[in-house]
Image: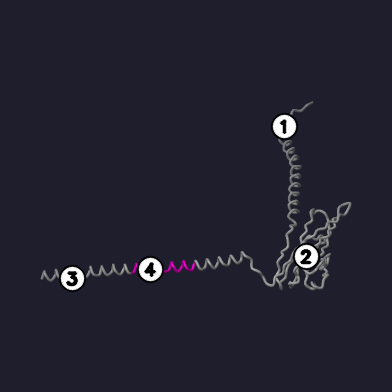
Amino acid sequence: MLTQVPPRLARQSQRTAGLMTDKAAAVPFQEAFGECFSFSLTAQGCQAGCVEVDSDTQAVAGNGFKLGCISCKKRSEVEATASITWLFQSPDDEDFREIYSYESVGVVQDEQFEGRIDWNGSKNTRDLQDGSIYLHNVTLNDSGIYKCNVYRLLTYQNYEFNSNATKVVHLNVAPKAKRELTSIISEIMMYVFIVGLTIWLVVEMVYCYRKIAAAGEEALRENAAEYLAITSESKENCTGVQVAE
């Protein structure tokens, strides 16, 4: 025997089934959207993790100087270890000579730089991407060509791959700091502006003084004319009074 379902209950059952279907369809979409959004953030973060910037090349004798050496790993998700070696060639040298090496700890290899080099690169990691060093108390003899050799070992799931990179820095050491052209021009323009402003203020003060002086003279003339007019009127009044008597 079949039981007939009331129309109102049937409509409620259809709406409930429709909501359950929509929720079931929304769950995979939300999961997929979340995965895509997470992947997008991760990808952007990886791309912005390392930027290769060239080192400065102008130093001043007696000051410190940072020799920059940044070598970014192309695939950040791959594990790697790296070591750094710095070489130097002065204008009088025929070949490069090793002056510093870093692998977990730094070691100065040349007497000329003994006690004057500090590690200024990546810290607390074996995956070195910044191999910069800091040179203390720069001398004129430190002018020359510096090479930063980066030896990187990439570890994949089934094999390892060696990737090497070299950064070159041509260092020029000056006896004293040289002012840049833009700095000189800026200072000249500042003095020109100050002189021009002073002249304008003087001219403005002279103009205002003359204007005030002219206005004062005009006021004196007007006061004198009014005084003479009042005096004449007083005399005429006095003369009229005498005639009347």
- Residues at marks 1 and 3, CA–CA distance in whole angstroms: 122 Å
Crowd band around label 4 with a 10 angstrom C-alpha radius: few (<14), some (14–19), many (20+): few
Q: Main secondary structure of the magenta part?
A: helix
Q: Which residues are magenta?
A: 197-216
Is residue 205 in the magenta section?
yes
User: For numbered disc 1, what is the local secondary structure?
Assistant: helix
Farthest-out residue, right? 158
- Residues at marks 1 and 2, CA–CA distance in whole angstroms: 84 Å
Nearer the observer, disc 4 or disc 2?
A: 2
Please report whichever mark, 3 or 4, sits nearer to the chain's N-terminal start: 4
User: For numbered disc 3, what is the local secondary structure?
Assistant: helix
Q: Is 158 rendered above or below residue 102?
A: above
Q: Quadrant of residue 233?
A: bottom left
Please report whichever mark, 4 or 2, sits nearer to the chain's N-terminal start: 2
Image coordinates of residue 51 in percent, x first then y, are: 74, 57
Residue that label 4 marks: 210
Residue that label 3 marks: 235
Residue type at mark 1: give it.
Answer: Ala
Q: Which quarter of the rendering shows the N terminus? A: top right
User: For numbered disc 4, what is the local secondary structure?
Assistant: helix
Q: Are marks 1 and 2 in contact (CB under 8 Å)?
A: no
Residue type at mark 3: give it.
Answer: Lys
